[in-house]
Amino acid sequence: MKPIKNQNWFVYIIEASDNSYYTGITTDIERRFTEHLNGKRGAKYFNGRSPVKIIFSEANHDRSSASKREASIKSLSRAQKKQLIKVAPEV
């Protein structure tokens, strides 16, 4: 019998203090935001800038699909990311 894939992964975008966007994946968005905020286990991206708020999240991914979606979002222009955020449900 084939195991059921873990569908508890999220793709998220955080707005940084310099108004840039950081895209990542996690199984717990609040925990991950706190890690970025405290610098402990946070992304190097936040060295010299601070996470302000989560502005986008997408649920129901497995690890593989979350990674693929993260890569596709990272390849978007800023204008395309703004459009994605605009049409997404409120976080």
Image (spheres, rainbow, N blue to C red):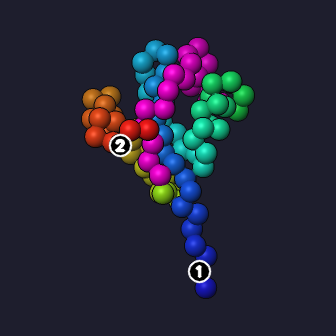
**Does any portion of residue 82 appear in the rendered image?**
yes
x and y percentages locating residue 85 in the rendered image: 34, 36
The residue shown at (42%, 18%) is 19
According to the image, label 2 marks what residue?
89
Q: Please tell me which residue lies in front, 36 or 30.
A: 30
Left or right side of 89 for 11: right
At mark 1, the secondary structure is loop
- Residue 29, picture quadrant: top right
x and y percentages locating residue 16 in the rendered image: 49, 21
Q: Which mark is residue 80?
A: none
x and y percentages locating residue 60 in the rendered image: 48, 57
**Label 2 – label 1 distance at C-alpha:** 33 Å
User: From the image, which quarter does the N terminus lie in?
Assistant: bottom right
Q: Amino acid at mark 1?
A: Lys
Left or right side of 9 for 15: left
Q: Which mark is residue 2?
A: 1
Magenta-colored span: 42-59
The residue shown at (58%, 73%) is 4
In the rendered image, residue 45 lying in the magenta stretch gets the answer: yes
